[in-house]
Image: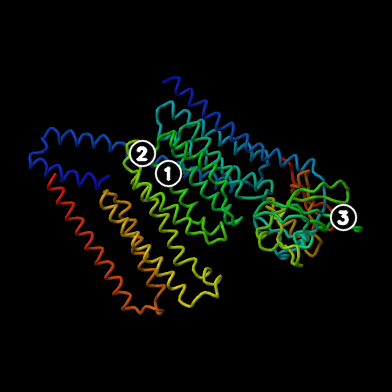
Amino acid sequence: MRLFTNRTAYALALVALLQTAALAVMVVNRIRLLQTGREITLPIVPVDPRDLFRGEYVELGYAVGRVPARLLEGPPPLGNAPFYVTLEKAQDGSWAPVKLTRDKPQETSSDRIVLKGRSRFALLTIDGNNATTINNVRYGIEQYFVPQGEGPRLEALARDKKLAALIAVDASGNAAIKGLLIDGRLQYEEPLL
Amino acid sequence: MSWYRTKLERDLARWQTEGWVTAAAAGAIRRDLEQRKSLFTAGPVLAVLGAVLFGFAIMSFVAAHWTGMSKLARLALLLATLWGCYAGAAVLFQRQLNAFAHAAVLAGIAVFGASIMLIAQMYHMEGHPADAVLLWALGALLAAVLTGSTPALAATFVLLSVWGTWERLDSESAHFMFLLPWGGAALTAAWLGWRPGFHLAALSLLLWIVPLGFLIWGYHAHWLVVLIGAAVALGAVAAGETLNRHLPISGALFAYGLVIAYAGLYILQFLDDSRWLASRPEGPEGAGIARLLLLAVVSLVGLLGAMLFALKTDNRPALWLAYAAFALEIFSLYVKTFGSFLNTSLFFLVAALIVSGLAWVAYRLHQSKSATGAGA
């Protein structure tokens, strides 16, 4: 009986340990992405400009979330599997999509960066031959939980100003919001821990 | 349980007056029932409910006190709660308070899920939310495998079904990946020898099979669902005796097969036909009606057959499911054909003929059953 209860205790400790490990992997991956990822700045397209920071979280829209279907190169993406959008930096420093691929392309130029995206309706709307645009490509940077207490301040700062997000992108194309820029100045930076 | 006790009390009294059962034997039977009843006391049920409420309390407390906490403090709080639940479970197992220990394991699983969501919120992770549910389900499965906790296994099946459905809605594909973790959970149920676990496994698989027709082979493959269900039901009929020698599951298998087959037939008749008709505009005018009639006849005959078999094998759940399906079929046909090729009175006449026929068959069957009963 003693042995049995000891074994149960070890089993429970193993459960707690492995679940903790799973959570730790989530956090560590994210911190590594924020720390070591390449930085790009993407202007935020106002979805609802009046109450941007009032709610618990906001939906952030980006110009790069609309990708013309003619940019598709190679086979179309499968179902709800992620696909890759290559962005290119223009003369004025803004980023715009130039390529859409099912597999991750090798881009070595410093003027190009690859983002992993998803679209719920990829299956229905992607057709390389017509000129439709894939709206609503999501890169995992569209939901922003407003930091507690920061809402009103950011709201006041953002009124009639240009908003942008500082994005960290890792080598696999994962993206994360690192901070918020208002009129080109970093006004809020996400703490790592 | 109580309906069984009431019925048994009545029967025992009758058997005793008939002289088939002695007073001592009746007493032994009652004592045995008393002992079995102790398995169903309120304690464990309340403990599990308490664990669920505990989980909700933690989540709402954390959500309300998030302000002002650094990310590190939040992570520490989540992990401390997680370890607290499993440490509590260890202590409770040691004191042989198994029901409460299992409840603590369940609370730990709830905290694990809450932690996934809160960490995703803290770091603005969006990605693919269904992945978070899968991670949660795998955490629950881990707890079930390592601690042999049946509530954890029940949580696994529920979470896997949520994950599978979410993935399917997102991808509009069959999502065969579901079968992999489902198989793991089903094997765990078999390994633990937990009978309700078989039902949960069957139910979650049923939820996966029934919509399959919408998702593969041109999105109208409901006949495949019908075939799967029919194969399971007929397999249970054909191999029932052999199966039951190892595990008494043929009755349940028959009921699940019946539900799957009828769900497929229902979709074919009432949910998918408009698309089917639209895709064949060149077909003759009455093709849709002829098809509906054919499927309705197949359904009603199949359900009648199922009822007779359920009566013969004393399979109460299957009998009631078949009755319910029969009623649903008649009602749906009525709604569908209202004001079209059948007028209302003709419809009721047909329904009445079918039901009367059914009553006659049931009566004959009952007679022959009591005849063999008297002969034995």
Res B43 label: 2
Marks 1/3 in contact by CB < 8 Å: the verdict is no
Corner quadrant of residue B356: bottom left
Residue B220 image label: none
Q: How is the image coloured?
A: rainbow
Which dot marks residue B49? 1
Q: Residue at x 59, y 57 (%)?
A: B172
Q: Amino acid at mark 3?
A: Lys
Tell me which corner region of the image, top left, top right, bottom left or bottom right, holds residue B22.
top left
Rendered-image quadrant of the C terminus of chain B: top left
Q: Is residue B30 above or below residue B259?
A: above
Name the chain under label 3.
Answer: A
Does residue B255 lie above or below B347 as drawn?
Answer: above
Mark 1: secondary structure = helix
Question: Is A95 on the left or on the right of B350, as rendered?
Answer: right
**Separation of residues labelled 1 and 3 (CA atoms):** 56 Å
Query: Chain under label 2?
Result: B
Q: Which residue is mark 3?
A: A89
Q: How many angstroms separate mark 3 from mark 2 (CA)?
A: 65 Å
Circle 1: residue type:
Leu
Dot 2: few (<14), some (14–19), or many (≥20) neighbours within 10 Å?
few
Q: Position of residue B92 (x, y in %)?
A: 44, 30
